[in-house]
Amino acid sequence: MNRIFFFTGKGGVGKSSVAAAHALKSATDGHKTLLISTDMAHNLGDIFGVKPGKEIQTIRPQLDIYEIDPEYAMESDFAEYMDYVKKLLQMGDDTEALEMIPGMEELFSLLKISDIYKSDIYERIIVDCAPTGETLSLLKFPELLSWYMEKLFPIGKVGVRLLAPFSKKLFHVEMPNREAMNEIEKMFVKLQELQELLKNREITSVRIVTTPEKMVVEETKRNYMYMNLYNFNVDGLYINRILPRDIDNAFFDGWVVLQKEYINCLKESFAALPIYEIPWYDEELKGEENIRRIVDDVLKGKDVFEAKLITEREGFAETETGYRLDVHIPGAEKGDVDLYQAATDIVIKTGNFKRNIPLPNVLRTYAVTGAKLEDGVLRISFEKEEEDDEEQGS
């Protein structure tokens, strides 16, 4: 099965080098590979010593690179969908206003990645993402936009709940005939399909790159928690720029001790994940020869492209008294999570991020009766709302 890998992390931790090393290894192993940058501060061209344009470029056998220009993709590849969104937001032909809406560029970047995946040209797509906050905005935007569309427009016939394969089986939901849908409905279904692609654990993986420094370690923990809150499968951690323990320089002795402390902290916090340790190199990692050092020192002999199931997808399960929704939020503590029911949504808030999870139709007459955070899993219980006395007596 063809696969997609997103590499994320705090700015400056070396995401691009780690992503490039994976792409180089994949191509060297004989797999048709595309390395994509969604960071507006593109540097793939700098790493490989080429000058990429606005289209996909081949740089060696089996390896292509692509620095996405969202504005160019919007105009050249998604004119039809731009019209959908303009109609949705009643913008007429104001393209510049559309581009200024937060998330629009991220949306069309993801749609481009989705179309490339569906073309079946590449066995592996490696995505070098922008820093943490921008990456989360990138990945969660399709769900957020589809949520707004469902609230604003009468698209009940395509209100498909793609929370988990299990929930689809449970509620027996089928996709409608595309010919019967209007433009807004087509866009809605496109967003649903994009969400399913991003959250399919057999297809898409998120990998976090970090360094053994206090502030970076704390952000890495939050990043992992937020990615799971939005139901993405994080299945790898890369600790970059590790100083050698036997370095013969007293100036670095204190750093080595601190790094050891933070590395142990990361290993304890991310014990469920495969962890890869990348040494501190004595020169800038630019050019294929230098990038290959990561391949030879860290990735060689390891199946880094295997699909790994770390956390289950969120999903509804029937219980003796109603239903239960399980949402994985590893690293979260009880006091960090706020939960409430708002109309037909369950709202979960942790830190600076909030997620609305729409309830399936079958649960519209159910109410939340309890919630427990156990071993990184938020278990939310639903029971049938009781009729009031007047209704019971009628």
Image (cartoon, rainbow, N blue to C red):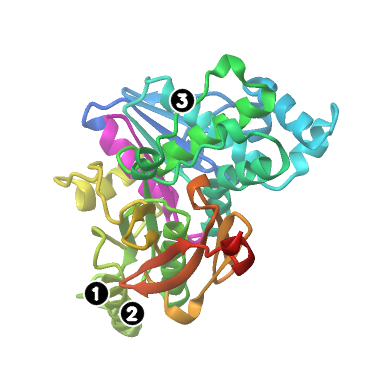
**At 28% from the left edge and 50% from the top edge, which residue is drawn?**
294
**At 39% from the left edge and 49% from the top edge, which residue is drawn?**
17
| Quarter occupied by the N terminus | top left
Stretch in magenta: 1-27
Q: Quadrant of residue 149?
A: top right
For the residues carrying marks 3 and 2, which lies nearer the camera in this image?
3
Q: Position of residue 304 (x, y in %)?
A: 23, 46
User: Can you identify the residue that label 2 sits on?
Assistant: 252
Is residue 68 at least partly visible in the picture?
A: no
Question: In the rendered view, does 155 fall on the left or right side of 317?
Answer: right
Q: Quadrant of residue 112?
A: top right
Q: Residue furthest front?
A: 394
User: Can you identify the residue that label 3 sits on?
Assistant: 116
Spatial CA distance of label 2 from label 1 is 8 Å
Circle nearer the N terminus (1, 3) = 3
Position above or below: 161 against 115: below
User: Can you identify the residue that label 1 sits on?
Assistant: 247
Q: Nearer the viewer, residue 25 or 237?
A: 237
Spatial CA distance of label 1 from label 3 is 45 Å
Position above or below: 118 against 161: above
Position above or below: 122 against 40: above
